[in-house]
Image (cartoon, helix red, strand yellow):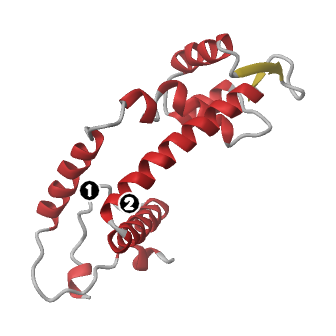
Amino acid sequence: MDCDEATRTNGSPREVDWKGLARELIVSGRGMRRGRGMRPKDMEMRGEANALHVLHHYPKGVTPTALARDCQVSSARIAKTINQLEGRGLVRREASPSDRRSVIVHLTDEGEREVQRRFEEINSYAAGVLRELGEDDARELVRLVGRLARIMEGRAECGSPASGERDGADEAR
């Protein structure tokens, strides 16, 4: 997808209150986070859960610095998280083979089982929500969220303004 394609409007002839729709989306997102029936600690992707998830995607391990960057936390915060996870037997540290002063953090087998357990919990919850929507709405939601993700990835790759403000070129299309 090229940069113009990633930010193109749908060509609707009537004026759309894009900022109003954005507010509705944000408010709806807040409502989803407060959803009943789920315990926030089980579903959140912060702290330990986020570190485990990131480590899952590095089968050969990763340095604490890279882990902190991918988790978007400070090096002090990731050090505390690694210590907690190590104390629970979910991660292990090894000396880096290329630089003995550095360490590589790996998931243990128990850590991988914990990641899989969390994935299964989240997947089961999401499947239940989609079931309540019904097949047609669920498929449409998945299609739209996928499209939204591609648009946002395209905007990030192209360096489009985060605010969504354009120079007026889109209106001329």
- Tag 1's secondary structure? loop
Q: Does residue 148 appear to the left or right of 120 in the view shown?
A: left
Give neighbour class at mark 1: few <14, some 14-19, many 20+ (Cα, 10 Å): few
Residue 163 marker: 1
Residue plotted at (49% across, 25% down): 47
Q: Does residue 23 appear to the left or right of 35 in the view shown?
A: left
Q: Do the residues under discs 2 and 1 have CB atoms within 8 angstroms?
A: no
Q: Nearer the viewer, mark 2 or mark 1?
A: 2
Residue 103 image position (x, y, % from top left): 77, 21
Residue plotted at (66% across, 10% down): 87
Task: Give the amino acid type for the residue marked by disc 2 in the picture.
Answer: Arg
Work out whether residue 1 or residue 86 is closer to the camera in this orientation and state it: 86
Task: Give the amino acid type for the residue marked by disc 1 in the picture.
Answer: Ser
- Tag 2's secondary structure? helix
- Residue with the mark numbered 2: 131
Figure check: 49 above or below 24: above
Residue 115 marker: none
Based on the displayed image, in which of its 4 quarters is residue 36 positioned? top left
Q: Does residue 11 appear to the left or right of 54 in the view shown?
A: left
Residue plotted at (46% across, 35% down): 45
Figure check: 145 above or below 62: below
Based on the displayed image, in which of its 4 quarters is residue 110 positioned? top right
Q: Does residue 129 appear to the left or right of 93 in the view shown?
A: left
Figure check: 16 above or below 61: below
Work out whether residue 9 or residue 57 is closer to the camera in this orientation and state it: 57
Residue 101 image position (x, y, % from top left): 81, 16
